[in-house]
């Protein structure tokens, strides 16, 4: 494991995003890196498709959607 130097603005955005997503700063950076690599390797897939594939590969099953209340 190594150290990666990023600019202060990106670090601030990383810190804010990690708070919203409930991840540590390192986990958020890892998520962004992984998704970025997947986007470059699969330019024909949308972000939602990539995340759905990652969740399926991890064995996560989506919860059924609830019908809207009248």
Image (cartoon, helix red, strand yellow):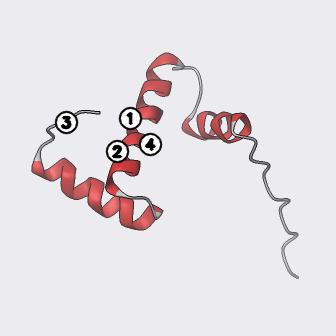
Q: Secondary structure at mark 2?
A: helix
The residue carrying mark 4 is 31
The residue carrying mark 2 is 29
Give the quarter of the figure containing the C terminus.
Answer: bottom right
Categorize mark 4 by other alpha carbons within 10 Å: few (<14), some (14-19), many (20+).
some
The residue carrying mark 3 is 4
CA separation, marks 1 and 2? 6 Å
Is the residue under label 2 in contact with that under label 1 (CB below 8 Å)?
yes
Q: Secondary structure at mark 4?
A: helix
Q: Quick one: which residue is furthest to the top in this view? A: 41
Is the residue under label 3 in contact with that under label 2 (CB below 8 Å)?
yes
Dot 3 or dot 4: first in sequence order is: 3
Categorize mark 1 by other alpha carbons within 10 Å: few (<14), some (14-19), many (20+).
few
Give the image location of residue 67, x and y in percent.
88, 69
Residue at 60%, 40% (x, y): give it. 51
Residue at 44%, 20% (x, y): give it. 40
Give the quarter of the figure containing the N terminus.
Answer: top left
Is the residue under label 4 in contact with that under label 1 (CB below 8 Å)?
yes
Q: Secondary structure at mark 1?
A: helix
Is the residue under label 3 in contact with that under label 1 (CB below 8 Å)?
no
The residue carrying mark 1 is 33
Q: Quadrant of residue 52?
A: top right
CA separation, marks 1 and 4? 5 Å
CA separation, marks 3 and 4? 15 Å
Task: Decide if residue 41 is on the left or right side of residue 58.
Answer: left
């Amino acid at each position: 494991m190594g150290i990666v130097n990023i600019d202060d603005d990106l670090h601030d955005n990383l810190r804010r995003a990690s708070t919203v997503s409930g991840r540590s700063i390192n986990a958020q950076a890892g998520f962004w890196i992984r998704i970025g690599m997947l986007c470059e390797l699969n330019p024909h897939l949308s972000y939602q498709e990539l995340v759905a594939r990652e969740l399926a590969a991890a064995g996560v099953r989506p919860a059924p959607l609830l019908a809207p209340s009248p």
